[in-house]
Amino acid sequence: MKILILHSDVPADAGEDELDCLTQAATIGEAISTLGHQPATLPFGMDLRANISGIREHQPDIVFNLVETLAGKGSLNHFATALLDFLHLPYTGCRTDAMFITSNKPLAKKMLRQAGIATPAWLTLEGETEDLSREDAYFLKPCREDASVGLDDRAVLQTRNPQTIRDALRERQEALGLDCFAEAYIDGREFNIALLASDQGVRVLPPAEILFVDYPPDKLKVLDYRAKWVEDSFEYEHTVRSLSIAPQDESLADRLREIALRCWHLFGLRGYARVDFRVDGQGVPWVLEINANPCLSPDAGFAAALDFAGLEYTAAIDAILQDALKP
Ligand SMILES: Nc1ncnc2c1ncn2[C@@H]1O[C@H](COP(=O)(O)OP(=O)(O)O)[C@@H](O)[C@H]1O
Ligand SMILES: [Mg+2]
């Protein structure tokens, strides 16, 4: 089969978070060749007509969708799937509605809350959703960006006063040039669960815990931009992924798997996905966000979970391609 790997049109001077898309394209291209298919790559940019003619020229049997940003904005990633829908081409990963909803964190949280899945209390500038008086600290996050864009030590606010939070939100929005919301800060452990489509339905991969090793007591334990992308930073070097679950955490792991699976069905996810959690001091898991089409780089969490589960990376790419052909 001809597989067109469609990826974000990333300028050479883009940040590591965006450039990573090219690493994924190269690794997936190799896997596609190993599977006996013909890979080709194409950047997806702002010119709709150029995208359409570029895609048509390749006459792909399947498009492997790695478009994470458009014009540098994660908030526009659903443009690629919308165009592929328009062209009636089979493509990997999540469909347009799931891309749109999960990329809008407050909207996804609203759906989680309605489905009875715990997600931390939040506040947007348009209106708060619940009583904030129970929480001591708030985390200010962009509504529609991924990859910890805009997250650093200044993102947390020690207050429970809605007016103070709103003022800080306005300031943060202006500084970042991005819409932001405030979310109750969950001071606890961090886990994520990867999910992969298969012939027998979705497969829930082993939970991964992110350990914050030797973090000074006054330092915020969060996977911020530096922890994810700045290789020689303290944060990058002191955040470690652990896939071995201690016996006393088995029931927590089961609970995380069950919630991740509910998220898969609630958001109509396809192909592959990852759910990020924080677990509070009482052992309650809170869903932070749903990642439709998470990073498939060889050094990222998804590949690590595959490896721990004893699944070959190439077999996972095959499963994702097979899923693209399902109605
Ligand atoms: N409400 C929260 N409480 C505690 N930590 C948080 C919270 N929200 C985000 N974080 C931290 O910030 C990281 C990135 O946030 P997340 O919502 O997953 O956005 P992104 O799309 O940037 O990955 C998380 O992995 C976690 O370490
Ligand atoms: Mg995340």
Image: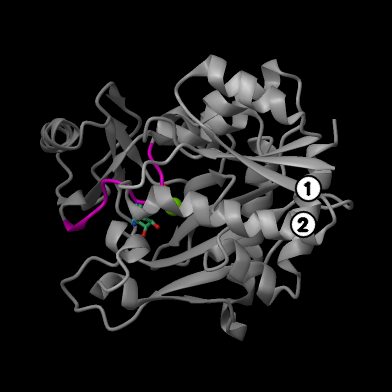
Outermost residue, right side? 200
Q: Which residue is mark 1?
A: 38
- Toward the front, the furthest residue is 57
**Residue contact between numbered discs 2 and 1, judged by CB atoms under 8 Å:** yes
Position of residue 205 measured from the top left corner of the image (x, y, whole percent):
69, 64
Residue 290 shows up from this direction: yes
Q: Which residues make up the magenta segment? A: 145-153
Q: Amino acid at mark 2?
A: Ser
- Mark 2 or 1, nearer chain start: 2
Callout 2 environment at 10 Å: few (<14), some (14 to 19), or many (20+)?
few
Tag shown at residue 33: 2
Q: Give the amino acid type for the residue marked by disc 1 in the picture.
A: Gln
Viewer-proximal residue, 305 or 32? 32
Question: Residue placed at 77% from the left, 28% from the top?
Answer: 59
Question: Which residue is pictured at 59% across the width and 45% down the height?
Answer: 293
Report the residue at 69% width, 60% height from top.
30
As drawn, 149 above or below 109: below
Marks counted in the figure total 2
Could you classify mark 1 by the number of other residues whose Cα lies within 10 Å: few (under 14), some (14-19), or many (20 or more)?
some
Q: Quadrant of the C terminus?
A: top right
Whether residue 151 appears in magenta in the rendering, the answer is yes
Q: Secondary structure at mark 1?
A: strand
Evaluate whether residue 114 shows in this view: no
Q: Position of residue 160 (x, y in %)?
A: 18, 44
Instruction: Classify residue 284 as left or right of residue 237.
Output: right
Question: In terms of image quadrants, where is residue 166?
Answer: top left
